[in-house]
Amino acid sequence: MREFNAAFLGAGRMGMTHLHNLVSIPGVHVLVVADTRLAAAQNGAAIVRAERASDDLDAAIHASDVDVVLIGTPTNTHADLIEKCVRAGKPVWCEKPVALTLEDTMRVVGAGESSGVPVMIGFMRRFDPGYAAAKRKIEAGEVGRIERFRAISCDFTPPPLAYVRTSGGIFVDMLVHDFDLARFLVGEVEQVSAWGSVLIDPGYADAGDVDTVVAMLRFTSGALGVLEGSRRTTWGYDIRTEIAGSQARLVIEAPQKTPLLTSRGLGYAGDHYESFPDRFAAAYRAELDYFFECLRAGTAPAPGVRDALESLRVALAATKSMSEGRPVKVAEIK
Amino acid sequence: MREFNAAFLGAGRMGMTHLHNLVSIPGVHVLVVADTRLAAAQNGAAIVRAERASDDLDAAIHASDVDVVLIGTPTNTHADLIEKCVRAGKPVWCEKPVALTLEDTMRVVGAGESSGVPVMIGFMRRFDPGYAAAKRKIEAGEVGRIERFRAISCDFTPPPLAYVRTSGGIFVDMLVHDFDLARFLVGEVEQVSAWGSVLIDPGYADAGDVDTVVAMLRFTSGALGVLEGSRRTTWGYDIRTEIAGSQARLVIEAPQKTPLLTSRGLGYAGDHYESFPDRFAAAYRAELDYFFECLRAGTAPAPGVRDALESLRVALAATKSMSEGRPVKVAEIK
Amino acid sequence: MREFNAAFLGAGRMGMTHLHNLVSIPGVHVLVVADTRLAAAQNGAAIVRAERASDDLDAAIHASDVDVVLIGTPTNTHADLIEKCVRAGKPVWCEKPVALTLEDTMRVVGAGESSGVPVMIGFMRRFDPGYAAAKRKIEAGEVGRIERFRAISCDFTPPPLAYVRTSGGIFVDMLVHDFDLARFLVGEVEQVSAWGSVLIDPGYADAGDVDTVVAMLRFTSGALGVLEGSRRTTWGYDIRTEIAGSQARLVIEAPQKTPLLTSRGLGYAGDHYESFPDRFAAAYRAELDYFFECLRAGTAPAPGVRDALESLRVALAATKSMSEGRPVKVAEIK
Amino acid sequence: MREFNAAFLGAGRMGMTHLHNLVSIPGVHVLVVADTRLAAAQNGAAIVRAERASDDLDAAIHASDVDVVLIGTPTNTHADLIEKCVRAGKPVWCEKPVALTLEDTMRVVGAGESSGVPVMIGFMRRFDPGYAAAKRKIEAGEVGRIERFRAISCDFTPPPLAYVRTSGGIFVDMLVHDFDLARFLVGEVEQVSAWGSVLIDPGYADAGDVDTVVAMLRFTSGALGVLEGSRRTTWGYDIRTEIAGSQARLVIEAPQKTPLLTSRGLGYAGDHYESFPDRFAAAYRAELDYFFECLRAGTAPAPGVRDALESLRVALAATKSMSEGRPVKVAEIK
């Protein structure tokens, strides 16, 4: 079995989740944990017993004993770091998104595709057992021709408004996951129509964003879709997807976090998931497993930067539709 | 279509439920509502627009224009009334139980079987869509050889202790429904072992009964079963049955009364049924429909008095086992 | 208790369902069953033991011993029949819709409102235990400010294309139920955007309709909504509604028809409802109960013709949006 | 944070699961993987990058740089290995059971308790999020006085008959998990009554065992319980537990493995878990986390050997009851 010496960049909260998953993959050796905050790098390296810690991300990428790079740094650094990796000929996995603008993302697509170096972007939902099983059923023809798509994406805890201001907007920041799933499960999107409202906190308006959105999709296949998004619920992390086809309906939903129902007072109750680390714990493990399987098999890991680009275009079309009050074709986004 | 002129005896709360079901059956004409309390009879007759009301149950049975009798009177009157009907040659449906003692029940079996008059006893659960579908699957061989049976029967609201004193005990009064289902779905019971406790109200001990029971069944087929019963829950009317076979498992359960889930505070909640009138509303309708279908088709309706007798014997064996602290064979009950 | 002598017009399949419900309402006496097909009227009258049958609908309405009218005739007769009833001063319940055009519906609104005669239109979903409970929770403030609405309406068995041609289109024919629920649960709709596709049968295009639709709603409150509709599924009658508010989420859904789960082969299975008569059986009973409660209490039954008009306007706005490829304000429909 | 140098004994399939969990615990360093089969030890050590592999279990226990031992070897070696660890003063976690006989288990209890060395036995179900949450609710008084307990334990794939012969019988081998849960959630058991049948494979009779069992428990608190067990289902790994109390009912059940429902043909379907590694994946991780938390906090980890002993006594009482056809008090087992 081929062994890998990995550098992991970014030792924040989600970075640590990825690091723990990484060290449990047979044959993967975490050589370096790098973070611009040296203490964070050292702490992360200690916890997973990596050989060394560093605050020099470039050095970690270019170290001669590092042969694969995983990136969990803040969004605005992704594009440059991926480019450096592919130029150095090092396979790279990076948290989504590649970038918030089309230009930056296209630049990375160009670099990646000309280099031929494997690049995978962390749209982890594809690796959730529910979504993965849905994909298999669709590919096996069990669903028939897809007629309708439905997605809902709502966070339980709203992000700080400071984050919202630089997030790219709710479609680029949150619903891009649903656009990725739409493309993964149904196919390319031709047209988007979107509306938004500020219902939760007027601060979203000040930040140039909305907190509640709905959208419709028209796929090139003729299939139709609806989406809903919200920055805050009182009931939990609400992520659900449905596929309605000529042969079957798929509902991807994890309604209950803990295998316990409590009954009292003529009723029963169960609990919901709170956030992506608990709802998608298995997906985060599976996507890294898959990345290394691809490297070993010599196949291109997906989703790659091209996927990230296409999903971003749908998100930008939604943003434009909301702003201009009219349906927008994805082809307009270029 | 053959028309029927029916007498309905007993205009209490459940009697009115049966009466409403009765009048919605095409071709069934409620001629008389009879109750020893004339006002109740008159009220019932008015509500369903029956032709006449009476406080003379015997007269209602023997009226020359009445050709079928339905009995919803108190338990201690069932045996005599059924006997009068079969002697008068009038098909009869009667609420369960036939009687609380083996002797009385056997007497009615004798009368019924020698007369050949159709008699049906209201073990309504058999007609619930869930139990009926389970039966069809078992008969179609989908479950394979049955290996295990599980039943739970718990009331939400405990009965008055005055009722408990004359109820025949929890096995004869409540779990007889489960013994009937056991026989309906699995087959005859060979042996019972039962334990009871007074956990809810010491008044049950004073009434010579227990409020909480468990039991094991050994079927003649070799299959095994467990039962639980309670006079009171805080969460609702808890009636569930499971069949585990060599090919499949059936779970008959109606977890949610209202088609609504409410989510808040990182959890979700639904509601439970409260009692037999709401949980088994469809079964109460279906059992009367079936009774008249049998009369029209000339087939014997089931369950009949013989079924009531056999289920009572299992209940008496459970009672004896609980009292004597040892497994009791059903064959001992005679 | 006030008694009613009712005339029932229309003895088709759903008419018989309503008739059976009607005869089980205490104090309601079905005097006449009328249908332009005399044999159908006679058959219906015989089954529910009505006093007389007739093929003269007008005569039934105007009969001096009839004091309330229920209409279950074909759609194109509703407006005229309701008008005749209100002119005759007879309270009337009528199956939805009032009419397929705004003009006809407005005419009936005018007649109804000037007369003061109670008129109720059969948007039965409001009376389903799930929807009714949702309404109570919203009114009790349990949901907080409503932020999002979601509806799906899909039939299992597609209608004949001949029906489609005169149905008014999928929004007026099917999704009008969802628009009624949107208004019932959330409030008035300001704007609609809708898309449609022909994915199931090219015959819908020939009939001037589509078979698959999505839509977005913007409510005057600022809340947003999404809808999906389809003329055919392979999995059952798919009717679901969600309300997301600042305090809670409500999901009105009846996932399982029969209280039975069958497990085999590392999986489990339950069944779905097939159509409105089984899914909304309780609602059909409850709406008629409520109608007579209103008559007895002297309160105006809802939804009335004005509700039907407003929901129709939303449906027509959706139809116009789909046809013109742009968002349409409901205020444009007049 | 205190660091630990661990020896892991036993590199079989479940051993590898534990090893992967072990290496993801911060501050735990796997120094040695030992297995009497050297190749297995070397393979395991390589996969988790342990410092060394060995076929000498004793040496691994006594190595001066090893300060904690985890045992995942075959059952018949557990007692001796635990004893060696406690004599060497090394905290030890061991897979259940301690031993199949009361004598061996009591010997280990004696050694462990006199030494004061922390010993934890791997009844992992206690650490499943569902069971752990149930325990918290019970301790918080949310359930009130416990009245009834229900457990079901069924494997999907039956074990080889060779294994059955030395397994100690179905109660000692399988249902001991349920007896542990009964004691964990409800309290000590006073009396057991059990029946068994051979329904799946006559080979179980030849092996001196049965394949299908039911049992009743009477707790010292007066609460009652029922249990079911089977060596084989066709639908999956069927592990469910219920607690019914004076205030609430708890149902610990994980009905669906993959967050996906597929609807077609008027029905819907989901999948079940297949075996303990998938159903209890989180529990296996949590029990080791907890073990090291206890070591760091200086508290005694539970369940310990005394718990294993008491649960074994209930299992032996059940075995005796089944064999003698009478209820057996746990106090008889000594």
Image (spheres, coloured by chain):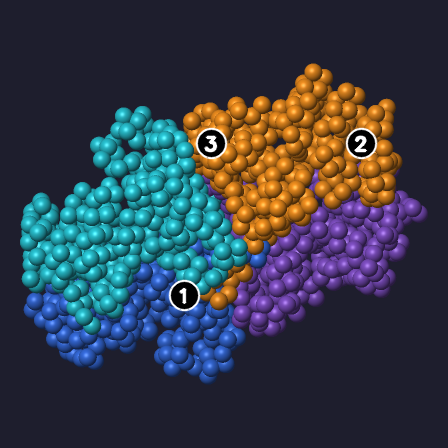
Chain colours: A cyan, B purple, C orange, D blue
In this figure, which residue is indicated by the disc labeled 2?
Answer: C7
Residue drawn where x is 49% and y is 32% of the image: C192
Query: What chain does mark 3 sit on?
Result: C
Q: State how far apart marks 2 and 1 are (Cα).
A: 60 Å
* The C terminus of chain A - image quarter: top left
Horizontal side of B260 relative to C21 (left or right) equals left
Q: Are marks 3 and 2 in contact (CB under 8 Å)?
A: no
List the single residue furthest toward the right. Answer: B64
Residue A142: image location, x then y, percent: 48, 61
User: SS class of the residue under badge 1?
Assistant: loop
Q: Marks 1 and 3: which is nearer the front?
A: 3
- In which image quadrant can residue A204 be found? top left
Q: Are marks 1 and 3 in contact (CB under 8 Å)?
A: no
Q: Marks 3 and 2: which is nearer the front?
A: 3
Q: Is residue C183 above or below residue B166?
A: above
* The N terminus of chain A - image quarter: bottom left
In this figure, which residue is indicated by the disc labeled 1?
Answer: D274
Q: State how far apart marks 1 and 3 are (Cα).
A: 50 Å
Residue density around tag 3, few if under 14, some if 14–19, many if 20 or more, within 10 Å:
many
Query: What chain does mark 2 sit on?
Result: C
Q: Amino acid at mark 3?
A: Pro
Residue drawn where x is 50% and y is 58% of the image: A144
Same subunit: marks 2 and 1: no
Residue density around tag 1, few if under 14, some if 14–19, many if 20 or more, within 10 Å:
many
Residue B279: image location, x then y, percent: 61, 46
Same subunit: marks 3 and 2: yes
Q: Marks 2 and 1: which is nearer the front?
A: 2
* Nearer to me, A313 or D54: A313
In this figure, which residue is indicated by the disc labeled 3?
Answer: C327
Residue density around tag 2, few if under 14, some if 14–19, many if 20 or more, within 10 Å:
many
Earlier-in-chain disc, 3 versus 2: 2
Residue drawn where x is 46% and y is 79% of the image: D204
